[in-house]
Amino acid sequence: MRPGNLFCLQLADAFADRRRVLLRAGVSVLLALPFILVGMPARAQAAGIVMVILFTGFFGTAVAHVHLREDRHLERLSLLPISRASLTLDLMLASVVSRAAPTALVLGAFVVVNGRQISASATIILAGQLCATLLLLTLLGMGTARLARSNAEVHLFGALTVGVLAVVCGVVPTPQRLAPLAAALAPNPIARLVAALVALPRGKVGISPTEIAFAALVLVATMAAITIRWIRGAGEKTQAVDSPEKTVNNAAARVKEGQG
Amino acid sequence: MVVLIVAEDVTRCYGTGRGVESVSLSVQAGQCLGVLGANGSGKTTLTRLVAGLDEPQRGRLSVLDAPSYPRPAHLRKRCGVSLDASAHWQRLSGRQNLYFFARQYGLAEPVLSRCTDDLLTEADLLAQADDPVGTYSFGMRRKLSIIEALVHNPDVLILDEPSAGIDAAFLERLTQCIHRRSERGQTTWVADNDPDWLARTATHAVLLEDGRVEARGSVSELTASIGARNRVEITLEQTDWDQRPDLPGIHKFHCKDNHIDIVLDDDPLLPAQILQWIVARQGRVRAMEIHAVTLREALAQRANRQEART
């Protein structure tokens, strides 16, 4: 494909190496497999699945963004006539899409194995919570990448942040002292995803109108943004055009002609 | 004359003490300014400031009649920048990378495809255009980076170390391209370490030393202003000559058999005066050859003088 914007460029780059894509998805699924297949308390299962999503979504984004900076891609992009908001949006959406593939695979496998007669509403809620979680993790990952000075530092920051998120979002049991904080952060998508996954094996995913509306809104807004950026940026497949011996000057003249 | 780049007392220093200090210069439309200097003299720092990547700590730097930092999108569109390190998406092909940059500068089909293919041809990259950039050699990446900066025919082209790792054929085409840009009234900023190439390419040059402008002007003015010395070789009819011309501006005089070798100031009148002086003392000159000093030789002479002083 011919990437016409940063969103398509990042996606083309992320999915260019199939072996790498398969390895990444494989690692996520392998890590999640015990929590999907082995019988254990619903709470432990949900915690395991969400930890895999935290690592894939947050860690992956933070490390990828530090690489973008260290490889001087961000610097190169800042010279282009694109607004900072557009750059950030494209980077964020591309990151969400590339992390969505392995995490959706993990969540899908969990639902297939453990979900008892899962309704359409519960599916929307799970998909919406996953989408909101990935958006939040991407934002946090990009923020952490800004703070970290090097690749080594981002791994340290990443481990710390995943630990803190796991505690305050109730992925692992929250200490008594942090209970008020966890209660205040209860509406966050990670905590909601944990709650939905805990309820899933019992077939009791809480279906409130607010929850469905929120999940649907997040899904539709994200899908709309992704579709718009894809349509604007995706070109036809690359193919060589007959290239006569032209000078740079001729090319420049054509450019002027095109701009005119 | 329209001045596109103006620096007044520009300072940008780093914690290590490196950077640029009190730099003042201007580049007019149609000029190609070559920025020369030893490693660590501040070329890249100054180029980054002009490119709009960093902000001066002191002084005023304007590009295209606006402060260089932060540079608004409509002015970024009129600039093309190739930095000293190539930043590409390694898993994507050269064509995909070039296509992305071209699209960001507003180029549209069908001009875009033809233009990118022409540039890939110019850079001898057409055969490898669909290979991942990760498989490219250093020089191929540099060439790709340069054509990415050229793809939208910018009013101001900023190149940092373009000659590093580049083959002679492409370098020659780049020289011609820069000359044509100058004829069209477009401005080029080139920071490079190859004085021979810069002397052929740039209309003007500045020499940086320890972050300060040491000399400036047209390439010949710069060569003269850094105290360049020419060499004159004289072959005489007689073999017993041993008189040294008593003229100011002569630094070295060596005579062996009928051959005289003189190192002298870059003064156009001095060789004629030497000839006159020899003839007036019954010297019979068979041949005389003047070796005008190149910018590279002038810089080497200057470095040697500085080394001798320290």
Image (cartoon, helix red, strand yellow):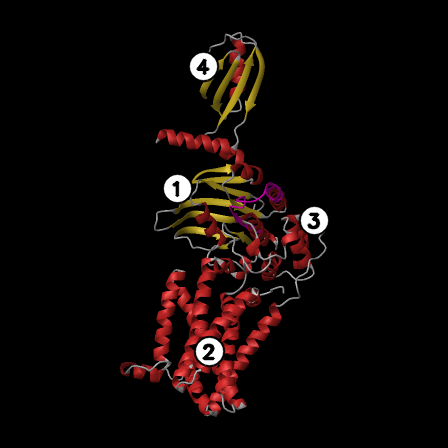
Report in which chain the residue with disc 4 lies: B
Quarter of the image holding residue B197? Answer: top right
Q: Amino acid at mark 1?
A: Asp
Q: Is residue A228 visible?
A: yes
Please report the residue visible at 50 percent of the width from the left and 85 percent of the height from the top: A113
Q: Which residue is mark 4?
A: B246
Q: Which mark is residue A33?
A: 2
CB atoms of marks 4 and 2 within 8 Å: no
Image coords of residue A48 (percent x, y): 41, 79
Front residue of this view, candidates B164 and A60 = A60
Left or right: residue B274 versus residue B173 is left
Q: Please, what secondary structure does the residue beneath circle 2 have? A: helix
**Residue B128 colored in magenta in the image:** no
Give the farthest residue toward the front: A38
Disc 1 vs disc 4: which is toward the camera? 1
Q: Is residue A178 above or below residue B278?
A: below
Tell which tag, 3 or 4, sits nearer the viewer.
3
Amino acid found under the numbered disc labelled 4: Asp
Mark 1 → mark 4, Cα distance in angstroms? 37 Å
Q: Over which residues does the magenta segment extend?
A: B155-173
CA gap, disc 1 and disc 3: 42 Å
Q: Residues within 10 Å of mark 2 (few under 14, many from 20)?
A: some
Q: Secondary structure at mark 3?
A: loop
Residue type, label 2 = Leu
Q: Which residue is mark 3?
A: A246
